[in-house]
Amino acid sequence: MDSKTLRGTRIVDQESSDHILSVYAVQDQYVLAQEAVDSKENEIVAAPRVLERVPLAGKIVTGDALHTQRSVSEQIVARGGDYLWPIKENQPRLYEDIQRLFAPDKPKPGFGKIPTDFQSAEQTNYGHGRLEKRTLQTSTMLNDYLDWPGVVQVSRLQRELIWLRQGKSYKTSREIEFGITSFSREQASPMRVLQSRRNHWLIETGLHYRRDMTFREDATRMTIGPSGRILAILHNAVIGLIEGSGWHNAAKARRYFEGHLDEAFQLLITVQVHS
């Protein structure tokens, strides 16, 4: 099942709050739809508009905590999709309820521990001198209590980071993230929930890094009027084109097509629309 990532992609114009909100297909690595967010609104208003243009049935929509909204959740579920949202202080009641559920149980004398239905999964990765361990717990115990469209699981994700130098730890950190999803346990084990949450961040390497580093979007001076927003849209389209043509290294693809303009033009006129 493909994962769709809902994420705002900001332009370089720091004097204007206009930017582009994109729906990004993580596995296929292209932008499915995009919506301009002008200076008089925010991404919460634009999100339902851009999702209307995307087929959601059978898909997972993830996003930043800003998009953890009742209306968007209801929209996704009504159209046959599923959501996976992080919960932060912008939803204080929801945050406190989930935090309380996963708090360490301290039974009173003479009483046993309260039974739970917690399930868990772990992943450990090492790279760039850093060891990262992710532990995710899920529960269905709040299903009948939470007033949220479609929610069937809540989660607690703990990330532990250990920086190593010559095999020895010199720095550590830990962070906790709570979440909700309409993905049932029959559909998604804790490991799948954990992997889906990780996949959300692939937009950084698949889209944002390519735009900022390969296409030098941050360095451009095209920030007058709508220029920056148009440039972001064009870069999204180019990244989708080269990925769809079999190139997985955007820098190499850019260098190749710069020297083969006839093939670049042929790619433009033969492109097929993703469904």
Image: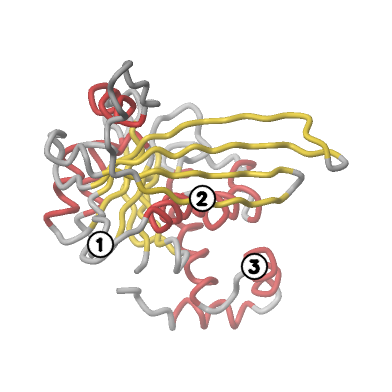
The amino acid on which the numbered mark 1 sits, given as a three-letter code, is: Glu
Outermost residue, top direction? 109
In 3D space, how far apart are the residues under numbered discs 2 and 3 (Cα atoms)? Answer: 30 Å
Asked if residue 168 is positioned above or below residue 197 in the image, the reply reads: above
Inspect the image, locate mark 2, and give the three-letter code of the amino acid beneath it. Answer: Glu
Quarter of the rendering containing residue 186 = bottom left
The type of residue carrying mark 3 is Asn
Task: Kindly indicate whether the residue at mark 1 contacts the one at mark 3 (C-beta within 8 angstroms).
Answer: no
Name the residue nearer the viewer: 51 or 65: 65
Asked if the residue at tag 1 contacts the one at tag 2, i.e. Cβ–Cβ closer than 8 Å, the answer is no
* Residues marked 2 and 3 touching at CB (< 8 Å): no
Name the spot of residue 180 as percent of width and height, x first.
29, 42
Q: Could you tell me which residue is drawn at 34 percent across and 27 percent down?
A: 99
Question: Which residue has dot 3 on it?
Answer: 249
Q: Which mark is residue 186?
A: 1
From the image, tell me which residue sits under label 2. Answer: 122
Q: Position of residue 220 (x, y in %)?
A: 61, 43
Q: CA distance from mark 3 to mark 1?
A: 37 Å
Query: What separation in Å lies between label 2 and label 1 (alpha carbons)?
Result: 19 Å
Kind of element beneath mark 1: loop
Counting from the top left corner in percent of width and height, residue 227 is at 46, 44
